[in-house]
Each structure stands twice: as C-alpha cells, then as structure tokens.
C-alpha cells in the first residue's frame, strides 16, 4: 500500500465508513488533535529513560497505556454515529478515567500541595509532559466542539479531561523526583518594557 493516495489533495478525507468530509470538519479536527496528543505523549515518553524516573511512579506505563487508548479514542472519533465500521472498534472504557484518578492520587501524595500557579517547565521531561497536557486540553476542546454538533461516545470526554489532569501532576512529579522545583508564576514579572 502506498503512503500517498492523492485522494485528499482537494481538501477532503474519508471517515471510517467511507463518508467524505472536509479536512477541517469538526470530527477530523477532533481525531487529528487526539493524534497530535499521541505524538506529544511519545515525545514525553522518550524523555523518561534520560530522566532516570521510569521505575518511579509508574509514569512510563501510564504513558504507554494512554498512547494505546488514544488510538481507540481517535478511531471512535473518526467514525460518524451509526457507522457500521464502528462496530469492530475497541470501546473507550469509563474505567480508563478511574485508573488515571488512582495514578493522580498516588502521585499527588508524593508532592507538596500546590499553592500557586506554575509555569510549564523545569526538567526536560516535565516540560514535555506540560506540552502534552496543553495538547491534551486542545484535543478535549475539539472533542467537546464535536459533541455539541453530534454525540461523542460518553467515556471520551471524561478520559481526555482526566488525562490532562494526570499529565499536569506527572509534570510536577517529574520535577520533584529530579530535585527540581516547579517554576512559580510571578504575576508582577514581565510588566516592564519589552
């Protein structure tokens, strides 16, 4: 199979089930943002071996599971309601959000309570996790926009929401385990001349 088909050269693509839509359709935006999120998770996961934190906190396992699960989320978003092609797709399970909650609770128990806003950054791993969190929030917004137009599988929105939360806490944990402090937001900084 060739990687290029030229079928999308006119700005359209095919959803699961064969329906052709514009490449800026809300459904394409939603599953495209999920694909971008998966790539951001892959970049974050690539930082784990360099950080020495893979065995601590189960972060690598959480990211690998999220990447697998995002394929299920993306495939569900790529199938319009009632598409027969959706019948063979893996379901998005409500338990996935609950698993993330358990990870978040375990990670937060190891952190100092958050008392102020923090800037995305710190260690390279934390910065990559913060970037993935921001991409996750965009994917969530795109899925919400699609859901306003037509139904989205019920477990998708809670999963994306919880994944964004988990990535934020994971970034803080990565900094803490590396002995790096979170970078606090200073509302007074940056007010001077540029």
Image (cartoon, rainbow, N blue to C red):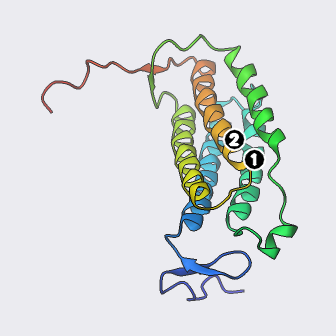
Q: Quadrant of residue 79?
A: bottom right
State the residue in front, 26 or 174: 26
Helix, strand or loop under label 1: loop
The numbered dot on residue 155 is 1
Along the line of sight, the residue nearer the viewer: 17 or 99 = 17
Q: Residues within 10 Å of mark 1 (few under 14, many from 20)?
A: some
Tags 2 and 1 in contact by the CB under 8 Å rule?
yes
Q: Which residue is mark 2?
A: 158
Residue that lies at the very extreme toward the right in this rendered image? 88
Say which quarter of the image contains residue 183.
top left
Q: Residue at x 19, y 24 (%)?
A: 191
Q: Image quadrant for the N terminus? A: bottom right
- Crowd rating for badge 2 (residues with CA inside 10 Å; few <14, some 14–19, many 20+): some
Q: Is residue 145 left or right of residue 102?
A: left
Q: Secondary structure at mark 2?
A: helix
Q: Quadrant of the C terminus?
A: top left
Q: x%, y% of residue 21?
A: 57, 78
The numbered dot on residue 66 is: none
Q: Up-down: is 64 above or below 83? A: above
Image point 33% across, 18% down: which residue?
Answer: 186
Q: Quadrant of residue 108?
A: top right
In the picture, measured across the screen, residue 87 lies left or right of residue 35, that is right
Residue drawn at the location 51% of the way across and 35% of the way down:
127
Up-down relation of residue 124 to residue 81 (above or below): above
- Total numbered labels placed on residues in the image: 2
Nearer to the camera, 144 or 160: 144
Is residue 41 placed above or below 56 in the rendered structure? Answer: below
- Residue displayed at 64% across by 29% down: 170
Residue lying farthest to the bottom in this orientation? 6
- State how far apart marks 2 and 1 are (Cα): 6 Å
Residue 100 coordinates in the image, percent (x, y): 75, 33
């Amino acid at each position: 199979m060739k990687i290029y088909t030229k079928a999308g050269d006119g700005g359209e693509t095919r959803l699961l089930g064969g329906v052709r839509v514009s490449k800026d359709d809300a459904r394409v935006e939603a599953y495209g943002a999920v694909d971008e999120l998966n790539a951001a998770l892959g970049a974050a996961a690539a930082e784990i071996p360099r950080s020495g934190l893979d065995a601590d906190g189960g972060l690598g396992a959480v990211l690998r599971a999220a990447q697998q699960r995002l394929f299920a989320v993306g495939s569900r978003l790529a199938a319009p309601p009632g598409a027969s092609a959706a019948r063979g797709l893996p379901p998005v399970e409500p338990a996935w959000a609950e698993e993330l909650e358990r990870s978040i609770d375990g990670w937060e128990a190891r952190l100092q309570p958050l008392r102020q806003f923090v800037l995305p950054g710190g260690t390279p791993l934390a910065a990559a996790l913060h970037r993935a969190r921001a991409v996750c929030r965009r994917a969530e917004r795109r899925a919400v926009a699609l859901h306003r137009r037509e139904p989205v599988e019920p477990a998708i929105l809670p999963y994306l929401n919880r994944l964004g939360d988990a990535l934020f806490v994971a970034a803080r944990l990565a900094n803490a385990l590396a002995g790096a402090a979170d970078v606090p937001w200073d509302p007074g900084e940056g007010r001077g001349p540029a």
